[in-house]
């Protein structure tokens, strides 16, 4: 994401500056105007309204520490691919492996909805998995058992460290707030 395209703000916890979530610019500005957060880094961009002009923050932190036991990881396609280590849940192929004689790259790996969206399946961690284009095509709008396909593992909701993906996709300035384990 380049600076020009920044549309979100990194929210840090109070005191610890641990990343809490990636929020929209209006929500960030509301937190600032309500005195609940302070600006840590500006984006250099401005939000213009008829009467006013607000600097758009890039990183803000809550004024006080909040105890967040287990936050739900934000779902994303990239997050699913990373969670599944770019491995097809049906045939197990990974980048560098081959399907029908064709060498697979990361670009050939897709996100499959186990219960297809056309049948009410949602963008959820437990309903999505990495699948190669061939398996995704073969499965089509069917359930795995209808297509005679088996899941090699059970897709799970990751822990909050997957916020790392959202942060990793953000501006470079956010990366210093990620704690790698
Ligand atoms: Zn496959």
Image (tube, rainbow, N blue to C red):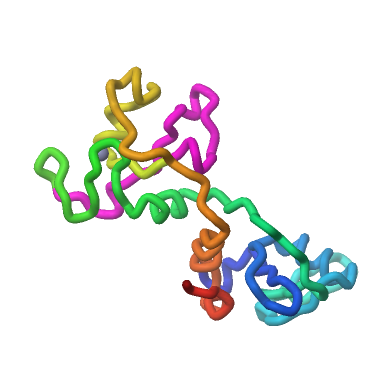
Residue 37, compared with residue 152, is above or below; it is: below
Q: Position of residue 147 (x, y in %)?
A: 30, 21
In this image, 93 relative to 158: left or right? left
Quadrant of res 99: top left
In this view, the residue in front, 101 or 160, is 160
Residue 122 colored in magenta in the image: yes
| Ligand 1 falls in quadrant | top left
Range of magenta residues: 103-128
Q: Position of residue 94 (x, y in %)?
A: 24, 51
Q: Is residue 157 above or below residue 166?
A: above
Pick whichever, 142 or 159, lies toward us: 159
**Residue in the image at 27% along x and 28% along y:** 138
Asked whether residue 50 is drawn in magenta, I would say no
Residue at 53 percent across and 62 percent down: it is 161
Residue 178, above or below 103: below
Res 14 quadrant in image: bottom right
In the picture, measured across the screen, residue 24 lies left or right of residue 135, that is right
Q: Is residue 53 left or right of residue 148?
A: right
How far from the left and from the top, in percent, is residue 172? Answer: 52, 77
Residue at x 9% of width, y 42% of height: 101
The one nearer the camera, 141 or 149, is 149
Number of numbered labels in the structure image: 0
Can you name the residue that lies furthest to the top here?
A: 146
> Which residue shows up at 63% across the image and 69% down it?
19
Q: Residue furthest left?
A: 101
């Amino acid at each position: 994401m380049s600076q020009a395209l920044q549309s979100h703000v990194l929210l840090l916890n109070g005191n610890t500056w641990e990343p809490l979530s990636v929020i929209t610019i209006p929500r960030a500005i509301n937190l600032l105007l309500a005195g609940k957060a302070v600006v840590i880094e500006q984006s250099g961009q401005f939000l213009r309204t008829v009467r006013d002009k607000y600097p758009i923050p890039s990183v803000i932190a809550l004024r006080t520490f909040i105890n967040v036991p287990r936050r739900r990881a934000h779902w994303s396609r990239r997050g699913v691919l990373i969670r599944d280590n770019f491995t097809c849940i049906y045939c197990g192929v990974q980048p560098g492996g081959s399907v029908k004689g064709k060498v697979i790259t990361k670009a050939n790996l897709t996100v499959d909805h186990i219960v297809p969206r056309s049948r009410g399946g949602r963008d959820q961690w437990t309903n999505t998995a990495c699948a190669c284009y061939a398996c995704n095509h073969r499965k089509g709008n069917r359930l795995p058992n209808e297509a005679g396909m088996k899941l090699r593992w059970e897709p799970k909701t990751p822990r909050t460290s997957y916020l790392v993906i959202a942060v990793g996709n953000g501006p470079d300035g956010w990366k210093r707030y990620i704690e790698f384990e």
